[in-house]
Image (cartoon, rainbow, N blue to C red):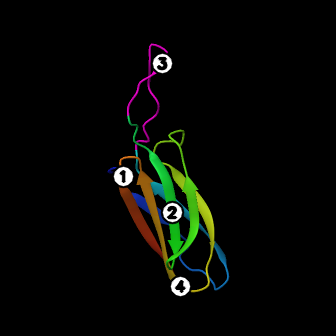
Amino acid sequence: MSVGQVRIRVPEKAKPGEVVTVRVLVTHPMETLQMQGGKPVMKNYNFIHKVEATYNGKTVFEAETTQAVSQNPLFVFPVKVSQPGVVKVTFYDTEGKAYTGQAEIKF
């Protein structure tokens, strides 16, 4: 898997008004703080710092993270679905890159 690959898992089918579980994983090294001689090494660490998810264009999940989150982080969140549509998740890292994936909710 290459850096920034986003994989989303949603149920194959849902019903109107149902709360579905969305599972999303992004491939990212999530650089951790390095120490040298007992002191932190000063550098700009690259990690996912923000996650946003939308369902049919409406924001349904937001999170801010730190470099303490594991490599290739997995996020799980519920979404109440009212109609068929698309769940779109975007991850933002500290280098200004955005990684996006989407999955279709079918009835």
Check disc 3 and give the amino acid type.
Lys
Q: Amino acid at mark 1?
A: Gly
Q: Horizontal and vertical percent for residue 1?
A: 34, 51
Label 3 secondary element = strand
Q: Secondary structure at mark 1?
A: loop
| Percent x, y of residue 28 | 40, 47
4 vs 2, front mark? 2
Q: Mark 2, mark 1: which one is toward the viewer?
A: 1
Q: Quadrant of residue 37?
A: top left
Q: Are marks 1 and 4 in contact (CB under 8 Å)?
A: no
Secondary element type, mark 2 = strand
- Circle 4 sits on which residue? 84
Q: In the shown orientation, is residue 30 left or right of residue 74?
A: left
Residue to which mark 2 is pinned: 52
71 relative to 51, above or below: above
Q: CA distance from mark 1 to mark 4?
A: 32 Å
Q: What residue do we see at 40% from left, 27% from top?
A: 42
Label 3 crowding class (10 Å Cα cut-off): few <14, some 14-19, many 20+? few
For marks 3 and 4 on the same chain, the one whose residue lies earlier in the sequence: 3
Q: Which residues are magenta?
A: 29-43
The residue carrying pointer 2 sits among few (fewer than 14), some (14 to 19) or many (20 or more) residues within 10 Å by Cα, namely some
Q: Which residue is mark 1?
A: 96
Q: What label sits on residue 39 in the rendered view?
A: 3
